Amino acid sequence: MKTKSLDMTKGPLFKKIIIYTIPIILSNLLQLLFNAADIIVVGQYCGSLAVAAVGSNGSLVSLLVNIMLGLSVGTGIITAQGIGAKDFKTVKKTVHTAIPTALIVGGVLSVVGFFLSGEILKLMDSPTDVLPLATTYLKIYFLGVISSSVYNFGAAILRAAGDTKSPLIFLTISGVVNILLNLLFVIVFNMGVSGVAIATTASQTLSAILVVITLIKRTDCCHLDIRKMKIYKNELLRIIRIGVPSSIQSSMFSISNVLIQSSVNLFGAVAVSGNAAAANIEGFVYTSMNAFHMTALNFTGQNIGAGKFKRVKKVLIENLICVSVTGIVLGTLSYIFAKPLLSLYITDSSAAIKIGVTRIACVGLNYFLCGIMDVIAGVLKGLGSTLYSALISIIGVCAFRLFWIFTIFRIEEYHNLKCLFISYPISWIITSAAYILAYFIVLKSIKKRFKTNKTTVEPEPQNSTT
């Protein structure tokens, strides 16, 4: 088969960013659309309590996904830097280490999560009327975590090589299967929340199979030979060194969201339902912007591998422009059409819709700030500095939101959902400022290292085409 790849170190930068990013945006939107189908189907046929059961798991599911995505980032960065430096031997070892690592990580999370689902939801103060359905959904969801892990590691390798179209195709196929199974299990077999969870698990398994087949069929350094799969010590340690801090960073956002979800749960099932529906709508804004995070990460990785520092700066600036425009436009649209969009999810509670509108006004309109933060974080990760990113996110996101919840939110006159939601944009501003400072420090340090070891990196041409 023809191997799909993209050289990110040469040629017009803006055009390549757009060509590379559009499939990621479409992939993310499709994935969210198919996930939204879960909530829409249960909302239309099972009522707002079922919506709350599925939606109350959103922040926890996001935490799991971010743990796997964070670890897969290590694989992607090493692959991108290896391709940029033309170190194909390292790339091959990374590919053959990544898949068995994904299986192990996914397996551990599946077992632990399955048996602790109920206890985790109780710790999150899930409403008692929602808890049984939410636990059922989460237990079944955990069974598909292995597949999700394999898909994320495999997709990270493909994107690092410049192939963003294949993941788009896989998500389209698995997403259609997810919707069809949703309709079958919920409407025909009347399985409710369980049916939605089984459909999600089955579609995740399909996408994992497709990504592995694609890696097997590749003919370049990203080719996967199942018989040669083994965990190479050096590559595993690099994946851990880069991936674990990235996983911690991603987890900090999700952990803080879990804490906020726990605070929302205190206001009852109506608040949980409205918050879940609004968060799902905002997800379309976030994932569109997050595509530029992935673009910034992989473009930075390849160009740092090639020693092209000026191009790295342009990667940052052009991605910041793109993500800001995307976030402002989509965030504004989500607010303008908030009520009709929320009505797709919630059909039996005007109070829940009102709460959803409040959240979109506080969070959705300001989501471009999150996009700016994510792009800078993506460049930092591409530079290989995932530790700085993790430390900043712990302080700027998790610690700040914890402080907000246990101080300002506890004040009687501010103990409301609006006060809770406004903590999001404030944390994005604080974290972005810290990220940009770290970017300049790390880039300066890398430049010094390259100057002392010029023989290992191809010098950047004086008149390179960008």
Image: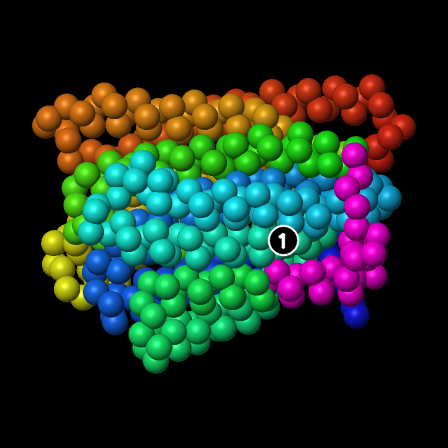
Task: Describe residue 249's horizontal placement relative to residue 422 as left or right.
Answer: right
For mark 1, what is the residue?
150
Q: Residue at x 69, y 60 (%)?
A: 212
Quadrant location, the C terminus: top right
Task: Describe residue 74's horizontal placement relative to residue 24 as left or right.
Answer: right
Residue 7 on image: x %, y %: 74, 52
Q: Nearer the viewer, residue 40 or 322?
A: 40
- In magenta, the rendered stretch is 207-233
Q: SS for tag 1?
A: helix
Q: Nearer the viewer, residue 116 or 201?
A: 116
Task: Describe residue 165's horizontal placement relative to residue 400 as left or right.
Answer: right
Q: Residue at x 64, y 45 (%)?
A: 104
Q: Residue at x 22, y 58 (%)?
A: 49
Residue 45 on image: x %, y %: 25, 71
In which quadrant of the rendered view does residue 211 lie? bottom right
Q: Nearer the viewer, residue 445 or 119?
A: 119
Q: Nearer the viewer, residue 448 or 65?
A: 65
Q: Is residue 69 magenta?
A: no
Task: Describe residue 353's horizontal placement relative to residue 114 as left or right.
Answer: left
Q: Residue at x 87, y 30 (%)?
A: 456
Neighbour class for label 1 at 10 Å: few (<14), some, many (≥20)?
A: many
- Is 90 above or below relative to 188? above
How many numbered badges does the structure rendering display? Answer: 1
Q: Residue furthest left?
A: 413
In which quadrant of the rendered view does residue 441 lie? top right
Quadrant location, the N terminus: bottom right
Residue 425 on image: x %, y %: 33, 35
Q: Is residue 194 visible?
A: yes
- Residue type, mark 1 in image: Val
Q: Residue furthest front?
A: 115
Q: Is residue 231 magenta?
A: yes
Q: Is residue 10 visible?
A: no
